[in-house]
Image (spheres, rainbow, N blue to C red):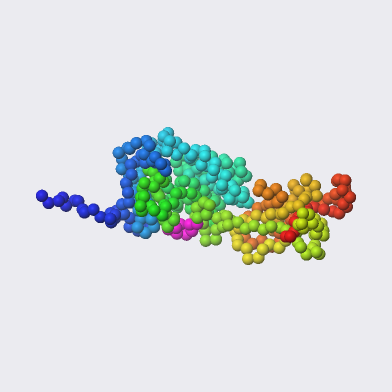
Amino acid sequence: MPAPTSFHPLSTQLKLDGTCKICASGTHLFDVVDMNKFCSPSDSYRFGLSGIPVYYSKCIECGFIFTRHFDDWSSGDFFEHIYNDDYIKVDGDYKERRPRANADVVSEMLRGFEGISILDYGSGNGVFSQMMRERGFADVEDYDPFSSPERPSRKFDLVTCFEVVEHSPDPVGTMADICSLLNDRGEVMFSTGLTPPDIDVIRCSWWYVGPRNGHVSIYSNRSLERLAERFGLFFRLSERAWFTRKEPRFSSALATASMSLLAPDQPAASGWHNIERSGGRGFRWTSEPVIEWPFPENSVFPSKWTFSVPLFLPVTEEFGRRVRIKIGEKEADLAPSSRDRSKLVATISLDCPPQDRTIRLITGDLVRPSEVSTSKDTRLLGLAIYTAA
């Protein structure tokens, strides 16, 4: 009896099955998993099998991996079958731990940008926004197409979306929605799992592929580059992933610059008393309430600068608490470094080169030690700052 004509010999070539949702190149059938597979590095079928197969395809050109299984689902379908009361079992971090951890990282990354407007897209229960407001970022809003569907009526400097884009069966539509909420210089900070180098070996056994978590779109670096290109943006990867403008505003600031503000070595230096020594190292007291250093040439903008003052001593403890750094219109208080209490540190973010390229250390009125202590020193003093040697 002849073999059935519907069967084909086994082959290493995967079946072509359509076009990519991102770049419209050809895709092939990549793998199939059970609907109950969830994101677990060790036991992704802990809750058994549903008997419902979910097929994933992979783009030949950009490496985007996705399933069409959920393309026709409504919000109600997702709420009933994925984002239901059992969701906490497959993602125990989404309510509290992950948004709190994100707020810790992001607030530190964006120090100096506290005045910007931020939209948390896919905000869930709003914990991230609450934590950011507690950390000094006053203008933060929530938006979640599922749980907080009232769409914002304005545009934002920064849209954050952490562990969101992998949940969308329509990556281009979601990206268009996000971009519509950005102002002209706005950027997107996000996170998602990126396919590992051996994805063609492990296929959808990779832990991050989990339809029960709603992970319906799995990205490679190349697929995110292609997605960004469709909207005139650039994909950049640093401590978080970014979709940025050609001249990025916030992501570039992560490449921080630093400068130590040392007392000058030359004997005749305006604003300083003579060099003294302690423990083999030189220091000198400030003799004016404002001390200046030139801002470095050939600096990159926008950028985030950390200035440190290697402090030998303030003339009084109270005096050391009212010192600040100023560059153009930007200024920040100096405070003891958490790592080295002998250093005063301040961070200032600069969007563009300051017109007045001068760094000013502002101390306020100086103090005569003889008037506030038993010292016989009658000089007007401010801070004693170390020299280079």
Query: Which quarter of the picture shows residue 326?
Result: bottom right
Residue 259 colored in magenta in the image = no
Q: Nearer the viewer, residue 205 or 59?
A: 205
Q: What stretch of residues is rendered in magenta?
A: 225-236
Query: Which quarter of the picture shows residue 210?
Result: top left
Count the marks: 0
Query: Which quarter of the picture shows residue 358?
Result: bottom right
- Examine the rendering and report whether any part of residue 141 can be seen: no
Q: Work out which quarter of the rendered image holds the C terminus and state it.
A: bottom right
- Examine the rendering and report whether any part of residue 387 can be seen: yes
Residue 265: % across, % down: 76, 63
Give the farthest residue toward the front. 280
Residue found 88% across the figure and 46% down from its top? 374
Left or right of 181 on screen, residue 305: right
Left or right of 166 on screen, residue 356: right
Instruction: Reply above or below: 284 against 165.
Output: below
Residue 80: % across, % down: 38, 36
Residue found 54% across the figure and 39% down from its top? 127
Residue found 55% across the figure and 55% down from its top? 251
Give the farthest residue toward the left. 1
Residue found 78% across the figure and 46% down from its top? 317
Residue 256: % across, % down: 60, 56
Left or right of 263 on screen, residue 194: left
Q: Nearer the viewer, residue 353 or 252?
A: 252
Instruction: Reply above or below: 275 against 148.
Output: below
Residue 318: % across, % down: 78, 45
Give the farthest residue toward the bottom. 298
Left or right of 30 on screen, residue 89: right
